[in-house]
Amino acid sequence: MKTENYCNRLADSDSPYLRQHAHNPVDWYPWGAEALAKAKTEDKPILLSIGYSACHWCHVMAHESFENPEIAELMNRYFVNIKVDREERPDLDAIYMDALQKMTGSGGWPMTLFLTPEGKPFYGGTYFPPKRHGQIAAFSELLKSLAAAWQEQRSEAEAVARRVEASLKRSDNAFDTEDNLEAMLGEARKRMIDYVDFREGGFGLAPKFPQAPALDFVLQQAALLQGSFLGRQYEDALRLSLSKMGNGGIFDQLAGGFHRYSTDGQWLIPHFEKMLYDNALLARTYLNAWRAFGDEAYRLIAERTLDFMARELLSPDGAFYSSLDADSDGIEGQFYVWTPAQIWEELGEKEGRAFAEAFGVSEAGNFKESGQAWSVLHLRDDAFVPGKWDGAIAKLLKAREKRVRPGRDEKILAEWNGLALQAFAEAAFALDREDYLEIAVNCAEFLLKKASWKEKNGLRRVRRAVNGKENSGYLEDYASLGLGFLLLYQVHFDAKWLKYARELAESILALFSDSEEAGFFQTAKDAELLIAQRKDTADNVIPSGNSMASMLLAKLGLIGEKMEWLELVARQLKRLGREPAIFPSSYGWALCLIQEELISPLEIKFNGTMQNTITEEAIALLRRRYIPGAVYLQETGKGKAEVSLCSDGICYPPSKNPAGFREQTEDIILERAKKALGKG
């Protein structure tokens, strides 16, 4: 049904999220000059709705409110309605999420904000129900109330908007400089342990997100400080978290891959969407935990996660799609859950009962949806036996494939593909998997072909298969892709990938630098002017653009002996002030960088050709060792084959045999551990 003022502007959008709303009776506009001009011309407030295509509650609010003709009529009469895909416009999402959190103390998606015609927020929330729910007003009541407030109490709304805008601008550069990084790291180490849930793993209480950057810092500390009391604390925290997550319902026990978060504190009932970034980051975390501690369960989870990505998110062109929806056939989680009868039908009663007991399937279930009790598969802690359930899993997967599949968001994001490239490149090296290397190279070649960061409009963030439209890139796109190219270089030493990583680093310096102080802006110097210009520094579920850029510059500065890059990174880390010490679980990669800054990275140089005994034996050793901060470099034209190690400004005599390299490596790792214990 169409309302009087309805106009379909989203049907040809490049965003699948916007296209999902194309036939709402709402007069939606995409973010842009037309919508902003209309708000000013008609003197109407803006209703800004931000979400993404895999978001369950975004779908719920759309069905309940945006498809309701009466609610849509109120929206069209009183507001200029703008719909934004947060994945395509992370700058808008970040600014307005910051505003929402300042106004309400919390945030999430769908994000629903009310703005002045100039784009300044004066009221906001997330999901609003169509009918009053306790103290939460019905969405129609809220629309009428805010429309009346705008007409009758505008000065109060504008005063709120001015305060929020001022707060946003202050927060961008609010950090004090911290000169004593050792003291800050020491405090962060202690507080991080306090954040760990030593009963169920992870950080804090429900809902629980698999915060890969924070887990990476825990892993770094556990591996670096092995044998010490502090190292054992971190190892216990890591092992508990990875085991609970890997056995929990947040991990797809049949097909592999992680859902976005757990709604409870036990990793049992997930929010069912699967995101490319989570799986890319967590695959590396599990892989390096296996390299550090040898637990085969971690290797299997890493491989199953990577195989899920390759099977269900890899495009024919070699790049990765963005996500799988939480819903299928309009029902959340329907694709993934089971009843005992369904299990027995596929496995027979004897094998089915054993499987159901091991994977927590019961008549009572643990997940209620549409009046039915279902069970989310989760592996009992003592039920893991490598290979034991492979046959049953294959049968159940075959049956599951007959169900209505979740929708797939097929846009290609440079940032998230950079993370996937890093995951497959590292796995190709650690596991000696040529198939993973092929996937990494194909992904890199696609990104190289489509990125075009040297053209007038710079690196592209988004590329869609629908009509080929592209959006300009952000700091996180340049930095993530640069790290991907750099890691690919370190896997098979094709010099072109090092060259491209350097070009992206130089573009970051040219486009995103702050001329007055350290740190990088999220948007380029020629980007659209918004109500605030942000420097994103927090590493939450994804490392921040600043952390990734700093890591790229630190590694390339070491390889290329660019002292000015290394000094810039040091200034950036000091600029973070005490934030990482106070909120360490939100600064995982930044803390990893601070630790490396204090003990210096380990540089491993392969001289001469790679086809020789010393090099092959050294690489075989390095595949199975996780060495935090290690940087690999090939130096051709250096005469006979040697492997040399450099750390903290000291280069040791080159090793000419495998035994010498192994002994020298162990000595340096021990020295770095001693230094790390004294640095914090």
Image (cartoon, rainbow, N blue to C red):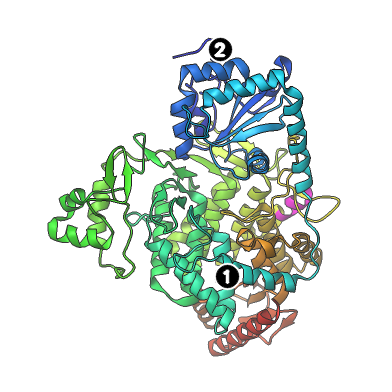
Q: Amino acid at mark 2?
A: Asn
Instruction: Please tell me whether residue 235 is drawn above or below residue 336 in the rendered image.
Output: below
The residue depicted at 34 percent of the width and 68 percent of the height is 381
- Residue 244 percent location from the top left of the image: 41, 64
What segment carries the magenta color?
505-511
The residue depicted at 60 percent of the width and 45 percent of the height is 106
N-term mark: 2 or 1: 2
Q: Is residue 429 left or right of residue 450?
A: left
Most distant residue in the right direction: 516
Q: Amino acid at mark 1?
A: Ile
Query: Predominant secondary structure in magenta?
Result: helix
- Residue 57 percent location from the top left of the image: 47, 37
The residue depicted at 51 percent of the width and 27 percent of the height is 138
Residue 518 visible somewhere in the drawing: yes
Most distant residue in the top direction: 4
Instruction: Please tell me whether residue 418 is drawn above or below residue 412 in the rendered image.
Output: below
- Residue 317 percent location from the top left of the image: 48, 44
Q: Which residue is mark 1?
A: 193
Residue 221: image tag? none
Q: Residues within 10 Å of mark 1 (few under 14, many from 20)?
A: some
Q: Which residue is mark 2?
A: 5
- Residue 101 percent location from the top left of the image: 64, 43
Front-most of 618 and 676?
A: 676
Asked if the stretch drawn in magenta spans residue 27, the answer is no
Q: Quadrant of the C terminus?
A: bottom right
Inter-mark Cα distance, 2 to 1? 56 Å
Q: Is residue 133 left or right of residue 651?
A: left
Front-most of 249 and 554?
A: 249
